[in-house]
Image (spheres, helix red, strand yellow):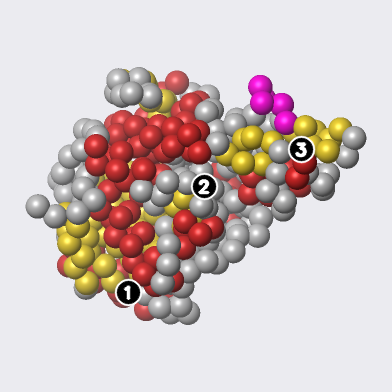
Amino acid sequence: MKSKVYFVPVEDAEDINAVNGKLKLLLAESRVLAFAEGGRKVVVKLHFGEEGTDAFVRPDHLRLICDDIAKKGAVPFLSDANTLYRGKRLNSKDHLEVATAHGFTRETVGVDIFIPDETKEADVREVQIDQRLIKTAKVGRCYVDADAFVAVTHFKGHALTGFGGTLKNIGMGCATRQGKLAQHCDATPTFYEDKCVGCGECEKVCPVAAIHMEDDRSVLNKEKCIGCASCVAACPNMALFIDLQAGDELQKKMVEYAYAILKDKKGKAGFLNFAVRINKECDCWRYENQRIAPDVGIFASADPVAIDKASLDLVNASCGKEIFKEFHPEQNHLLQLEYAQKLELGSLDYELIRV
């Protein structure tokens, strides 16, 4: 049986109230949050946005989603985990300041906001999954211990996974910094000295000082590299590449981490993808992030694989080509979906229901 994916179109320049009207209709028709009842504690996983950017799902939309959950008798709260790279989202205190600056407060969204602090043992959970690449996943305890789980995702491109949707929001987004490192560690870039012009852009963006300049050329210390791929995106001359196999391995690890979060949430999880303001790079990218597709709409499903496949298909259709493949040709864009289906997280076959 095909998984149901509900969809409401959104056009460029629609105001926030118009979009929220469509979101309200989508929630009602899809019943994607029907499991939220009986005092269940529901974690709503999102991305609060990188400092100084607007690449995140708006607080107004989260308010509507959380209100819908609360009206059903459950207790929602918003959460995201800290990042691997340097920046204002590296620790819980600064991360919360970024969330506040972007409009995510108790007053605006109507619920508590919790960012796990992995320096506290109580905030971390090790989940035994015994998969091919990951045996024990290190994640934020709140994502596993909550009675139910909702992922609210901004759909966009990504240098290492081709695109970032629900699976990435969960697999990468719920991991602790150690968990994120475990996923990235095989993605050390290959450096081609003959293409380097010594501009130093890669050195500027490296979060762990794994790159330095020697004789007007960049030198990469692979022992220090964490595989975040910031240098790959910053290089104007394509002197740095991520090995294809490393990218494949990262996607599989990411999916295995998603499995760790969702394996005990059967019938108690819902997913929403916002395919609007679709950028080339991940929402963590703090620099110029090119728009690569028109606004498409909002998707809702109980299947994390089907919702990502439907989102990918409709974004590509809106562009008349495989837009993520065009901007990230080195990545196998379907790998994460195929592997997630193999782990029985969901299905690639879906029925699209337009609301």
Q: Element under label 2?
A: loop
Query: Which residue occupies the foreground of this view, 6 or 325?
Result: 325
Q: Is residue 308 above or below residue 245?
A: below
Residue marked by disc 2: 330
Please identify, in this view, whether the residue under mark 1 or under mark 3 is nearer the observer: 3
Residue kind at label 1, given as amino acid type: Pro
What residue do we see at 35% from left, 37% from top? Answer: 255
Q: Secondary structure at mark 3?
A: helix
CB contact under 8 Å: marks 1 and 3: no
Q: Is residue 335 left or right of residue 193?
A: left
Residue range highlighted in magenta: 220-224
Q: Is residue 266 left or right of residue 104?
A: left
With 200 as the anchor, is 324 left or right in this view?
Answer: left
- Give the residue type at disc 2: Glu
User: Quick one: quadrant of the C terminus?
Assistant: bottom left
Which circle's residue, 2 or 3, is located before the other in the chain? 3
Along the polypeptide, which appears first: circle 1 or circle 3?
1
Would residue 344 be seen by someone viewing this image from the given angle?
Answer: yes
Q: Secondary structure at mark 1?
A: strand
| Residue highlighted by disc 1 | 9
Position of 157 with respect to 73 (left or right) is: right
